[in-house]
């Protein structure tokens, strides 16, 4: 599988409603079933009320970026996912890929100039619009997204 430890989800509290640690095959066909199951569990635990669309879309984009850009569609590699939720701090989603990383500041804005017409390049922009906090760590191989 992977030699990397699971990403840290830093929500260690008595109010923790949900904690999921998932290893996902670096295959785009794995995205839908994983996202659907995570969202089903989160809905059942009442973690996402009124925020389902934003969380689901951001999770799909983050997993797609990790699989396509980080793992480069290599089915022998894996992407790590951690999801936690508590009443006072909302939901934290961490996605880590096995890639070389990247500098998020180097990604051109998809809403400027000719980039508007590109078929790709909107994932990070969408995630930033949908989630309340977004941070990249570990040299760009890990994205941490929060929704309050």
Image: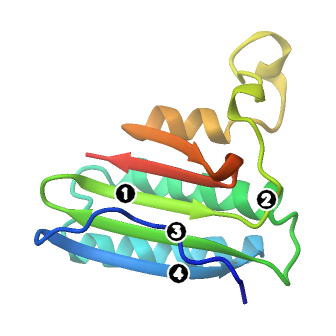
- Helix, strand or loop for disc 3: loop
Q: Position of residue 115 (x, y in %)?
A: 81, 21
Nearer-N-terminus badge (4/3)? 3
Bin the neighbour count of mark 1 within 10 Å (Cα to Cα): few under 14, some 14-19, many 20 and up: many
Query: Residue at the location (62% across, 63% down)?
Result: 96
Question: Which of the image's four quarters has the C terminus?
Answer: top left
Residue at the bottom extreme of this rendering:
1
Contact (CB < 8 A) between labels 2 and 3? no
Q: Please tell me the numbered disc located at residue 70.
A: 2
Which comes sooner in the sequence, label 2 or label 3? 3
Q: Residue at x 70, y 83 (%)?
A: 3
Q: Real-space Cα distance between discs 2 and 3?
A: 15 Å
| Residue depicted at 36% across the width and 37% down the height | 132
Q: On screen, 35 above or below 131?
A: below
Q: Secondary structure under badge 4?
A: strand
Give neighbour class at mark 3: few <14, some 14-19, many 20+ (Cα, 10 Å): some
Q: Is residue 141 left or right of residue 69?
A: left
User: Residue 33 appears in which quarter of the rendering?
Assistant: bottom right
* Horizontal and vertical percent position of residue 62: 61, 54
Q: Mark 4 sits on what residue? A: 22
Crowdedness of circle 2 by 10 Å Cα count: few (<14), some, many (20+)?
many
Residue at the disc numbered 3: 7
Residue 38's quadrant in the figure? Answer: bottom left
């Amino acid at each position: 599988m992977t030699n990397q430890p699971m990403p840290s989800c830093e929500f260690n509290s008595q109010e923790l409603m949900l904690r999921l640690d998932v290893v996902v095959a670096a295959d785009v066909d794995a995205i839908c079933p994983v996202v659907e199951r995570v969202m089903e569990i989160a809905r059942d635990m009442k973690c996402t009320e009124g925020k389902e669309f934003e969380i689901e879309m951001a999770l799909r984009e983050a997993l797609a970026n990790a699989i396509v850009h980080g793992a480069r569609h290599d089915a022998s590699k894996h992407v790590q996912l951690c999801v936690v939720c508590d009443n006072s701090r909302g939901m934290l989603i961490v996605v880590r890929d096995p890639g070389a990383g990247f500098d998020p500041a180097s990604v051109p804005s998809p809403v400027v100039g000719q980039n508007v017409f590109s078929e790709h390049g909107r994932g990070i922009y969408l995630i930033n619009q949908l989630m309340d906090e977004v941070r990249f760590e570990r040299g760009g191989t890990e994205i941490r997204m929060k929704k309050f």
